[in-house]
Amino acid sequence: MIKVGIIGGTGYTGVELLRLLSTHPQAQLKVITSRSEAGRAVADLFPNLRGHTELAYVEPDPAYFDECDLVFFATPNGVAMKQVPELLQRGIRIIDLAADFRIKDQPTWEHWYGMSHACPEQLESAVYGLPELHREAIRSASLVANPGCYPTAVLLGFLPLIENGLVDIDHLIADAKSGVSGAGRTANVGTLMGEVGESFKAYAIPGHRHQPEISQTLKQLADKPVQFTFVPHLVPMIRGIEATLYARLKVTETDLQALYESRYADEPFVDVLQAGSHPETRSVRGSNHCRIAIHRPLDGEVVVVSSVIDNLVKGAAGQAVQNMNLMFGLAENCGLEQVALLP
Amino acid sequence: MIKVGIIGGTGYTGVELLRLLSTHPQAQLKVITSRSEAGRAVADLFPNLRGHTELAYVEPDPAYFDECDLVFFATPNGVAMKQVPELLQRGIRIIDLAADFRIKDQPTWEHWYGMSHACPEQLESAVYGLPELHREAIRSASLVANPGCYPTAVLLGFLPLIENGLVDIDHLIADAKSGVSGAGRTANVGTLMGEVGESFKAYAIPGHRHQPEISQTLKQLADKPVQFTFVPHLVPMIRGIEATLYARLKVTETDLQALYESRYADEPFVDVLQAGSHPETRSVRGSNHCRIAIHRPLDGEVVVVSSVIDNLVKGAAGQAVQNMNLMFGLAENCGLEQVALLP
Amino acid sequence: MIKVGIIGGTGYTGVELLRLLSTHPQAQLKVITSRSEAGRAVADLFPNLRGHTELAYVEPDPAYFDECDLVFFATPNGVAMKQVPELLQRGIRIIDLAADFRIKDQPTWEHWYGMSHACPEQLESAVYGLPELHREAIRSASLVANPGCYPTAVLLGFLPLIENGLVDIDHLIADAKSGVSGAGRTANVGTLMGEVGESFKAYAIPGHRHQPEISQTLKQLADKPVQFTFVPHLVPMIRGIEATLYARLKVTETDLQALYESRYADEPFVDVLQAGSHPETRSVRGSNHCRIAIHRPLDGEVVVVSSVIDNLVKGAAGQAVQNMNLMFGLAENCGLEQVALLP
Amino acid sequence: MIKVGIIGGTGYTGVELLRLLSTHPQAQLKVITSRSEAGRAVADLFPNLRGHTELAYVEPDPAYFDECDLVFFATPNGVAMKQVPELLQRGIRIIDLAADFRIKDQPTWEHWYGMSHACPEQLESAVYGLPELHREAIRSASLVANPGCYPTAVLLGFLPLIENGLVDIDHLIADAKSGVSGAGRTANVGTLMGEVGESFKAYAIPGHRHQPEISQTLKQLADKPVQFTFVPHLVPMIRGIEATLYARLKVTETDLQALYESRYADEPFVDVLQAGSHPETRSVRGSNHCRIAIHRPLDGEVVVVSSVIDNLVKGAAGQAVQNMNLMFGLAENCGLEQVALLP
């Protein structure tokens, strides 16, 4: 039984982590901290957990975690980097669901996150927790940087094309759309239902923090810099990300359907749909799957990939549990076999 | 391992039954029939089931069910009553998710459902599958009539008041609201998103089929006729029912909170919230729970109960699985421990 | 041309007032104040107004209003009562869209609004701005208290029954449902789309501020105290209120349909639907109409009325403009002939 | 006063046309036909029109239109082409809201619409009704082909770039998103709220009918063939289209913001937002405006344009009325000054 703790956990990635851990057969949640909610029962804040956990939030204190094998950070960006060193010293392994350790280049991170990094010495050793790419490194990692939601959907969609050098890496485009839970559970006029319901918009077109995160991995895959345009959009729904990817084929003979199917044949959570399909975000609502379809519109030289995930599961808490399973030698899908809720 | 079959199962109660059975540790789905979809893989129609079932729909044929211990009818009203006798004769136990066997009085049923009943001889022996009321009878039943969605939410909310004779049974009101999945998966202008999205309305105010179903049980509980007004409403969301119940207290000293808590203390799926709470449908989305709160506005003589369920789970497929568990001596919550999806 | 000013107007009732006034043929908006947005163009905050107004918010200052014939308060409760005396002194007429002058009894107001009233001397003279009830008084009023959204829908539904003494006033119930715009445009976790989308709940069951506001008028109509239960609910949509009203008929011979049709025959904004109808909130989205249907379920002694309005129009800004039209001798529907947006 | 008729008009473009015409000061709706609804009052089918029109649907019969100056076809594709010749012969001018006359090349039209064209002789003379491009031709046209919803949003976004030869026309991409009203008001499982609510997906990636319609105009503008990729998506909302356009700049010195502002300076319905803006579909809900923003992500060589319209207004009925105004010498914005409904 893995003993786990959660730091933070009053937001949407937190409650989703609680949902998954509360029914996980091999993990036991020992402690969850929150400054704002200390003393309050978790199930008071999130009534869906009534009957599933007796836990209450406690004030943050590293000592609480001595009994833990693993700690999840479900905190805002910039919190984990301050506490990671002490926890590692205490021999506790860490999965950070925030962005503190996702970008290897310190100046790049500091530019996009607008603060100086408190723990640059761990940037190199931190493992980027995308199992489909770094499975072996994750198994032995002490510190896992859980990928962002958009990067997960976009990278899984691009992987086979870039790995095999099939497309022009100077013209990669990802047009991504996310439900509002991606914006978090903080009081904010911009995400009131009165503001975002029944409306659709692009945002952050000039530049979004997930662009450098995605570019970093695309560059590793291509082994040279790429030109990548990323535009996120806000969808009037709660959960789900769909990413539509555009690239120009350098060779048009390849059977892309077969390529994707073989690349992901052994992946428990990547599902390549039949040729001609269009994945719906509802087909992964509440599940850890990424479903993908590949097309060549009008049989032209442009390849279009549609990739869907639940931003709170494969895009956050579910992938974190998948990483935990790998780090502790469990079956990769242990506690992650929920069927998506449809309708 | 219980061997089960499903007749019908191309609608929303069907896909929900498939979701629950596909992860049920003690049940094995052997066959599912559909005239319209015969030959098609279940996971083609419902992509959330990809990776969870290899089953395909087959043409209806009683012979298919010989290997089954139990058959679920997820068919439109009027189908089960024609096939039940043969299946019972083959020694197969049955749970009907439709309305064919819910109402004991044949003329009443025929009035509300607009057809003559093909199997009146089973009306008496059929057990109304509300475990909180008929648990023992369900255990030994051959034919269970799974309650309607509205009746489940309304009856669980009224139960303690009526059983204890605390309210004036001549003035019972249930103002109920349901998500659109309750209207089913049939092509119909009236439930297009363009028609029901971003709008709210009452419907069937002159009379709704669930009124006599609810009245029948209220009458049993009160041991005399009741006057019960029922008004359903359509909510622009997919899942969930909230029923707001109004009754006049005959005695105002009773501690209603304590009464409800003790009545449901041993019920695995009825959750009485703390005094002062207001249940949200999202707190039961995808779960088999019914959550209830009791109030006395301005400390007057009117008691108001708010009761929420997921119409497709406790209101249909989940309650059917709960009944199956009882019929086959399994733990009542076996395969039903999913945590509600929030947000 | 009526010269008008708006105090506040950065919220939803404010932007709706701006929408209606910007196309009103007889009113000219001269000034709009806001502490938080002073200096900002109105159309920057609300892009739907681009091309319709050049106005910018200015710091609050009574002097600004000297050129105005009328000032609307679109402020939080408790603001208007502090500024009304000075404006009246300057000879400016006032419509308060907040609650400061809706309740005649000072202690009752102070109990429900949790503050002491700064301007009790105006409580008596202020006219409750429901044209269908107080049309003549509104024409000559200096200070109009614009009714609340729920009270408008509930009172228009109950009016004919109470005026004619047809129902038992000791058992009046209003089960009301509102879209989230009713909760305003303030940053608040409770109205994030992630919290209220795809979910339904009752709230404020123990007591809501609109209960005494409605009771006050019901009492006037019945000429004696009434027992009135009010339960509001939150609907996952942006605009619209539906109120389902329950009362017990004392006499069952009356032709209720004819009664309602004649009561509202000359009302420009109250539409009695054909017998057997069920009004949808979308049928009044963006319009100043209230649509009503009357039913007697199963021909019993309970009468059920369903009443719908757009909470931001007939429930707030539209009714305020209707009151302005009356106060200044214009056609009552001047500038209010928009057709509801359906779908 | 222009006398107009509508053929069809039981769908969403029909009801929107009725909304706009019922308050148009210079147009009078004389007759509306429908096979399915003949004899029924328009306001029965669409309650938002109660009090705005007394008209009832009549059986289709060309004779009805002799008193009309103009007839709108709000029919499915393939209907107008059969009736246009007779109406033209009777001297009646026509605006077809369907696709029959949008594509000049008969084989292309027949390939995409899967039928042979019944009236190819009018393909050349029909004017493509995009006022921003063909204003003068529209004024004198007898037959106007009203543009599709996606083409309107995409073409207005691309126009200034292509007209000025600023981008590489071999790599044009439009990632477009539409609310469900674009799918019409026909009974169809695929657009039930239970199917499309709370979900997002791409569709028709292999090829969509609006691709050749858009390509035809892009080719005219560029005066040579273009390579254009078009991917539509379905958004869980009712109204609104957002198109995100991607192109590669050939010259990067141009001030794109100034270019767009000057190109559309005199256009009554095209609004270029300030630099750095992101248009929301709600900012045009119910209005005839198209709002546009231009960006260069990370100051690179890719230009990204975001363009929003209401698919039922500027994308259909509103643009048809704008064309009518031009055809009959009225002010172009006559009857089209509605402010968008926000929130």
Image: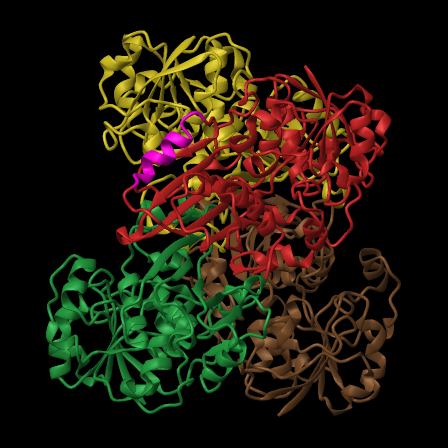
Chain colours: A red, B yellow, C brown, D green
Task: Give the x, y percent position of residue D338.
Answer: 48, 77
Does the magenta portion include B224?
no
Judge from the rendering whether residue B208 lies leftward or rightward of residue C228; answer left or right. Answer: left
Image: D322 above or below A320: below
- In the rendered image, the residue lying farthest to the front is A224
Does the magenta portion include A257?
yes
Nearer the observer, B336 or D174: D174
Judge from the rendering whether residue A29 lies leftward or rightward of residue B15; answer left or right. Answer: right
Nearer the observer, B92 or D252: D252
**Residue range (magenta):** A254-266
Residue in the picture at 75% in, 69% down: C75
Nearer the observer, A193 or A85: A85
Residue in the picture at 76% in, 76% down: C38
Is residue A173 among what the camera can see?
yes
**Quick one: quadrant of the N terminus of chain B?**
top left
- Splitting the image into 4 quarters, where does residue A164 fall? top left
Judge from the rendering whether residue B33 lies leftward or rightward of residue A16; answer left or right. Answer: left
Task: Give the x, y percent position of residue C280.
Answer: 47, 57
Image: A222 above or below D241: above
Task: Give the x, y percent position of residue B74.
Answer: 36, 27
Is residue B12 among what the camera can see?
no
Residue in the picture at 35% in, 70% down: D316
Task: Give the x, y percent position of residue C153.
Answer: 59, 61
Q: How many marks?
A: 0
Provide the major secondary structure of the magenta segment: helix
**Quick one: quadrant of the C terminus of chain B?**
top right
Image: A278 above or below C226: above
